[in-house]
Image: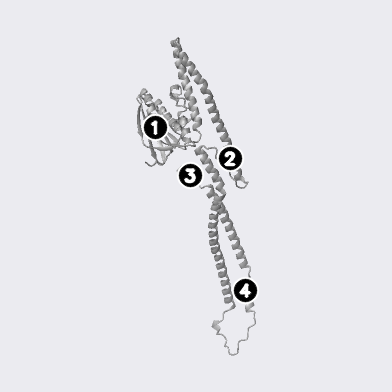
Amino acid sequence: MTAVAGRLRPTIRARLTLLYGGLFIAAGIVLLALTYLLVQNNLRDQGEPEASFTQVAGQPPQRAPALAAPPPPQDRLSAGQVKGVLVEGRKNYQEETMRSLLTQGGIALGVVSAAALGFGWLLADRVLRPVHAITDTARRVAHSHDLTERIAYDGPRDDVKELADTFDTMLERLARAFDGQRRFVANASHELRTPLAINRTLVDVAVRRPDATEDVKRLGESLLVVNGRHERLIDGLLTLAGGENAVADASPLDLADVARHVLDQAAAEAAERDVTVRRATGTAPAAGDPVLIERLVQNLVENAVRHNHDGGEVRVATGARDGWAELTVANTGPVVPPYELETIFEPFRRLRQDRVRSDRGSGLGLSIVRAVATAHHGRVTAEPRPGGGLAVTVRLPARAASPP
């Protein structure tokens, strides 16, 4: 019902056309009514037939020719009969004139109103063309996350020009803000890598010393685990900051090849956690940054393996459908509430039962997946499985298969 109501809702172009057409029709009806009254009064003010009849009746009788015989008495009309004929003829003439005025005026008003509606529809489109340009630009920016695009409206200095300039200014400020945020994350991540590398080296040297006690070795191993987690967090932040930028140079690739490579690398971890991996890797040609696409698939597979239970299952499928290259990663595991599907794509967000489990990641996996998919003009959807677990589908624009 909502979709039907949305389709039936008139657009602003239709409303403007109806408004202009309605005003024109109303003005035409008023003009036709005024014309009707003026013509009616003009016909009434032309005089009554009694004057013409009196003038005709008061004329002196003309002498008939000598040879003409007088008309027979039965063919002569009385004065009252002549007056009645004149009155009736004048009345019929007035009625016919007014009826013809209404008929022809109504037809002319209908034709001109139809033409006015057509011209109003065309003029409304011309007037709203800058607004459509603003809408198209906003839609492209929303889908591609490319804040470098501008409307650059060069029309007259009016309200539409002011709106377009304001929109361009807003895009420019947003672009500066996002660029500043990405630079901050990238610079901070790079600066943090050096002390973490130094810490890892020092701890590793201390643990490997011959005189190191068992307590020192256990402490060193714990510090190495924490240090490794911090390094993975920084790598994730760098990937997230770089993945949000649109991919300029896209290389041809096949999601099936990337998925098989990632599954081979994750086989040891899956076997360690007693997780069965099933694959159905059909051809899925696409184009993109191979490093980012591999990271996308790797994050999905790692999440599916780690957020699982012992003896669980992971299914990875690739294929091409409806102009899209698809990758689906489904796993068993804990039940995912539908209201948390959107929050798990936010950075540092995890399900409630996993917030204290540091060995399952830093909460950036699905955020990186969405950022990389968006940079490749794709989209990501997630659906909870009835028995528990999650099914995540990534769709990227398909690339035409190369001829053999």
Q: Amino acid at mark 1?
A: Ala
Nearer the observer, 328 or 94: 328
**Residue 398 bears which disc, if any?**
none
Query: Residue placed farthest to the bottom in the image?
Result: 67
Nearer the observer, 342 or 379: 379
Which-is-in-front pick, marks 3 and 2?
2
Q: Amino acid at mark 4?
A: Glu
Which-is-in-front pick, marks 4 and 2?
2
Which-is-in-front pick, marks 1 and 4?
1
Q: Is residue 376 left or right of residue 165?
A: left
Circle 1 sits on which residue?
Answer: 259
Question: How far is the residue under mark 3 from the one under mark 1?
Answer: 41 Å
Circle 4 sits on which residue?
Answer: 50
Question: How far is the residue under mark 3 from the one under mark 2?
Answer: 29 Å
Q: Amino acid at mark 2?
A: Asp
Nearer the observer, 80 or 33: 33
Question: How far is the residue under mark 1 from the one under mark 2?
Answer: 41 Å
State the quadrant of the C terminus: top left
State the quadrant of the N terminus: top left
Q: Position of residue 199 (x, y in %)?
A: 50, 18
Question: How far is the residue under mark 1 from the one under mark 4?
Answer: 107 Å
**Badge 3 or badge 4: first in the primary sequence:** 3
Circle 2 sits on which residue?
Answer: 168
Query: Residue placed farthest to the front in the image?
Result: 404
- The image's colouring method is one colour
Q: Position of residue 130 (x, y in %)?
A: 56, 46
Circle 3 sits on which residue?
Answer: 6
**Badge 1 or badge 4: first in the primary sequence:** 4
